[in-house]
Amino acid sequence: MKIEQILARLETGLGATKLSSQVQQVTLTLSQRTRASGARHFWHEHLRQLQYANPALPIQVNFPREPCAPKLEIKFANAVVDSFSISGMKSNDICQQFLDRANK
């Protein structure tokens, strides 16, 4: 794949959104032993776009060995943590819900 195509995929789409400066950290928790295809697709596609659009934002991905429901946490500047389950959701729905919560 050419560099222009790679950059075009990173710069366009739902995940290529500049987040509010109030967002301090994003954490995705995804068990190694569950089949969370929507969460895995979000990790591979949208989370990379978010990182490219917000290079200073720390994004952490946790893979615990024990089975657990996938979840996404948003830490804001005022130390509030918004955590929500993404179990059974499609990747575009996860991204849209994340953007709605992050930019409120």
Image (cartoon, helix red, strand yellow):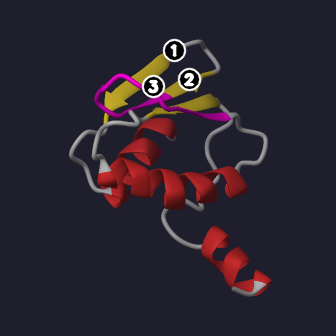
Q: Which residue is mark 3?
A: 64
Quarter of the view holding residue 87: top left
Q: How many marks?
A: 3
Residue at 30% across, 26% down: 67
Write down the region rendered in magenta. Answer: 59-73
Image coords of residue 103 (percent x, y): 51, 41
| Neighbours of disc 1 within 10 Å: few (<14), some (14-19), many (20+) | few
Residue 100 or 92: which is nearer the viewer?
92
Sequence order check: which comes first, mark 2 or mark 1? 2
Q: Is residue 29 left or right of residue 34?
A: right
- The CA span between labels 2 and 1 is 6 Å
The amino acid marked with disc number 2 is Lys
- Vertical position of residue 84 compared to residue 45: above or below: above
Image coords of residue 4 (percent x, y): 75, 85
Residue at 41% across, 51% down: 40
| Neighbours of disc 3 within 10 Å: few (<14), some (14-19), many (20+) | few
Image coords of residue 52 (percent x, y): 71, 57
Sequence order check: which comes first, mark 3 or mark 1? 3
The amino acid marked with disc number 3 is Pro
Residue 12 visible: yes
Mark closer to the observer (3, 1) = 3
Q: Which residue is mark 1?
A: 80
The amino acid marked with disc number 1 is Val
- Vertical position of residue 88 compared to residue 77: above or below: below
Residue 101 or 94: which is nearer the viewer?
94
Q: Which residue is mark 2?
A: 75
Q: Are marks 2 and 1 in contact (CB under 8 Å)?
A: yes
Residue 75 or 2: which is nearer the viewer?
2
